Amino acid sequence: MALTFLLLCWALSSLLATLLGWRSNEPALSLAAPPTEDGASGRRALLRWFEQAQEAAPVSPLASLQLIAVIAGHNGVALIGGIEASPVAVQAGKEARPGLRLVEVQADRAIFEQAGVRNELAFPPGATATVGNLLSPAPAAPPAVVPVKPAASAPAKPSPATSVSRGRLASIAQSGNLGAWDKGLAAFPDGGIRITAAAEQPLAQILNLRDGDIIRQINEREIGQLADISLVYHYFSQTQDVDLQILRDGKPVHLQYKIQP
């Protein structure tokens, strides 16, 4: 009887311990921890994220190129630096380098296309290196020229007009010889452009100029320096009648041209 009583007490105590243990394991509610303050480390991490985004920005395919001179138009030519050791003449429709195609040449910029994306390459600020403009409207303002004191000699009589095909002029651009635009030409100390090698200068050949000829004026505009060859390109590409004043064998000569389509 005593043993039965002891077993009963042990069972009741085990049950009571189980019940008390279950209650003690009930989850207790607690307040969420307050958010930590955003310190300098967070700001630094954000700045690093933006710096990485900027570093990942794509580099323009024209970043290393420089526009030196152009003959504008549909079949224009651009003289580009940065492709090879010396400037390269690239014609519209051709590739400057694999995958980078020149699609258009304007009076002040060249437009390239790569993988369907177009980018513009403009002249550096302050540059006035445009050589000519055979097929598009003329620039708003022609290049500045240096006034030249007229030669003290009798006025020359104009020669009969010579017909020049505009297509032959355009062929200068299409042949891709813009890279040697000053070949066979030299600045004359007293003002003007001297023909030093007519056989090497396509424009001189078209205009029937000779070695030693000095271009002094075109349509009453003074030619004062070598860069003024752009005026010659301009008038022959944009007008129908061209009057060229030159010195030949020390004597003034007027050459007249009729520009045909």
Image (cartoon, rainbow, N blue to C red):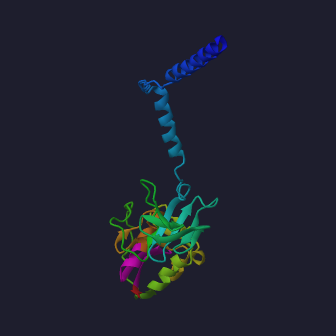
Where residue 251 sits in the image (x, y, percent)?
45, 75
Residue 256 on the magenta span: yes
Residue 125 on the magenta span: no
Where residue 84 sits in the image (x, y, percent)?
63, 61
Residue at image location 49% in from the left, 61% down from the top: 189
Query: Can residue 64 be seen?
Result: yes
Q: Nearer the viewer, residue 93 or 148?
A: 93
Query: Can residue 156 be seen?
Result: no
Q: Quadrant of the C terminus?
A: bottom left
- First to last magenta residue range: 234-257
Residue that protrudes farthest toward the front in the picture: 1
Residue that protrudes farthest toward the right in the picture: 3
Task: Decide whether the magenta segment is chiefly helix, strand or loop.
Answer: strand
**Which corner quadrant of the image does residue 91 belong to?**
bottom right
Q: Nearer the viewer, residue 194 or 164?
A: 164
Residue that protrudes farthest toward the top in the picture: 2
**Which corner quadrant of the image does residue 241 belong to?**
bottom left
Q: Is residue 99 above or below residue 203?
A: above
Q: Is residue 16 above or below residue 127?
A: above
Where residue 257 sits in the image (x, y, percent)?
41, 84
Where residue 105 sits in the image (x, y, percent)?
46, 70
Residue at image location 51% in from the left, 40% down from the top: 49
Question: How many numbered marks does the figure carry?
Answer: 0
Q: Quadrant of the N terminus?
A: top right
